[in-house]
Amino acid sequence: MAAPRIGYLLPTRDWTILGGDVAALAEQARAAEDLGFDSVWAGDSPVTRPRASWRTSSPPWTPCQEDG
């Protein structure tokens, strides 16, 4: 059986949405390589948008527990 290969997925969606520094992503990629990850992955979707969460996708009348 072949040994598993482990990769690192860069958080490009968050960087794109929040307007992060691309140099920081490049540094993360270099760090992943230095740590011995087999691959480094980056998303390239031209239509990146925030993901829906239960807070944004539930109707306002949906019962939920308060934080805290």
Image: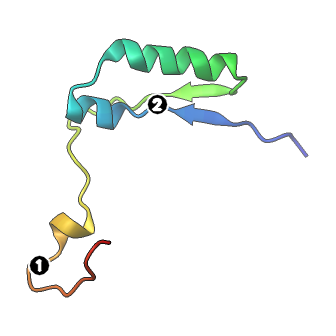
Residue 14 vs 53, above or below: the answer is: above
Q: Which mark is residue 59?
A: 1
Pinpoint residue 37: horizontal percent, then vertical percent: 68, 27
Evaluate whether residue 46 shows in this view. Answer: no
The residue under label 2 is 10
Q: In whole angstroms, how far apart are the C-alphas of marks 2 and 1? A: 32 Å
Which amino acid, by three-letter code, is at mark 2?
Leu
Say which residue appears at 59% left-offset and 18% top-offset. Answer: 31
Residue, far right: 1
Marks 2 and 1 close (CB-CB < 8 Å): no
Q: Position of residue 55 (x, y in %)?
A: 20, 67
Q: Quadrant of the C terminus?
A: bottom left
> At which x and y percent is residue 47?
20, 37
Residue 34: image location, x then y, percent: 68, 16
Q: Say few, some or many: other residues with alpha carbon within 10 Å of mark 2 (under 14 / 14 to 19 / 20 or more).
A: some
Q: Measuring 91% from the left and 46% from the top, which residue is drawn there?
A: 1
- In the image, 16 versus 48, the foreground residue is 16
Q: Is residue 35 left or right of residue 65?
A: right
Q: Which of the 4 image quarters holds residue 21?
A: top left
- Residue type highlighted by circle 1: Pro
Q: Residue furthest front?
A: 68
Q: Residue at x 29, y 72 (%)?
A: 67
Which label sits on residue 14?
none
Which of the marked residues, 2 or 1, is nearer the chain's N terminus? 2
| Quadrant in the picture for residue 61 | bottom left
Question: Viewed as shown, does residue 14 lie left or right of 27?
Answer: left
Inspect this view and state whether residue 59 appears. yes
| Left or right relative to 66: residue 41 | right
User: Judging from the image, what secondary structure is the residue with disc 2 in?
Assistant: loop
Q: Is residue 56 above or below residue 28?
A: below
Helix, strand or loop at mark 1? loop
